[in-house]
Image (spheres, grey):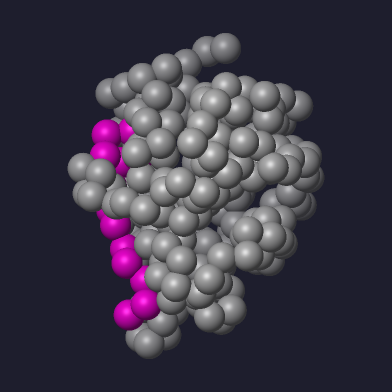
Amino acid sequence: MSNHQTNDFDFEEHWNNAYQKVPADNLGWYEEDPIPSMELILECNLPKDALLFNAGVGAATLIELLLNKGYLNIVVNDIAASALTELKNNLTAYKQAEVEFIVDDLTKPTELLKLKNVDLWHDRAVLHFFTTKQQQQAYFNLIQKVIRLKGYVILAEFNLEGAKKCSGLDVFNYNEEMLQERLGEDFKLLKSFNYTYIQPSGNTREYVYTLFQKIA
């Protein structure tokens, strides 16, 4: 597969531009009602004070839904400060106070390295943008470092039949076996399914959703 974005590609500039130029609810990955993510999160049956981490959150509606369900300890991350600003502006001041916002690069983390004992890692449509082995390894190293024993990982990425590009960038497609291999034997696959997402434009994108638990 071609790989135009190298380790030196400026993801920060790209994603800041994406959120500054187009309303969030018109973006190709915007999900008004993140049903599959919410179903997997609720299946984990975590206490309301569990530490929930959303990687590459963008301006996702999922955060407000989690707050509405009473979750009290949410950390969100994006490489684009503009995305987090938009997310923050969509929450009431009261709800903003219950969320920690971290601008950082998942493939070259600094602030994110301070995280520990994460109960749930959620990533929808982020990992598949990391197309080099170095980027992917850094991402999975971070998961392995911050997730506590018995913690959960939800990865929802373009599946093998899915799009090969998004937002003008190449993507790396996955199935559950590939994600299991990257996470390693310390993680057990609990559930996986394919899912057809309908974009705001009406076009479709094919995803694989996976739920893992750290068992060792």
Residue drawn 75% across the image and 51% down it: 198
Considering depth in this image, is 3 or 168 the residue closer to the camera? 3
**Which residues lie in the magenta part?**
97-109
Please state the horizontal and vertical placement of residue 63, each as a whole percent of the image: 51, 68
Q: Residue furthest front?
A: 216
Considering depth in this image, is 1 or 102 the residue closer to the camera? 102
Does 192 sit left or right of 128 as displayed? right
Does 83 sit left or right of 1 as displayed? left
Task: Indicate the quadrant where residue 162 lies.
Answer: top right
Magenta-drawn stretch, dominant element (helix, strand or loop): loop
Does 200 sit left or right of 137 as displayed? right
Please state the horizontal and vertical placement of residue 168, each as a whole percent of the image: 51, 33
Please state the horizontal and vertical placement of residue 194, each as a whole percent of the image: 78, 39
Q: Does 107 appear above or below 117?
A: above
For the N terminus, the quadrant is top right
Task: Indicate the quadrant where residue 133 lies.
Answer: top left
* Residue 107 falls within the magenta-colored stretch: yes
Residue drawn 52% across the image and 41% down it: 214
Please state the horizontal and vertical placement of residue 139, each as a whole percent of the image: 40, 33
Residue 69 appears in the figure = yes
Q: Does 144 appear above or below 137?
A: below
Does 28 sit left or right of 183 as displayed? right
Considering depth in this image, is 25 or 32 the residue closer to the camera? 32
Task: Indicate the quadrant where residue 69 lies.
Answer: bottom right
Residue drawn 52% across the image and 62% down it: 60
Residue 167 appears in the figure = no
Total numbered labels placed on residues in the image: 0
Residue drawn 41% across the image and 36% down it: 144
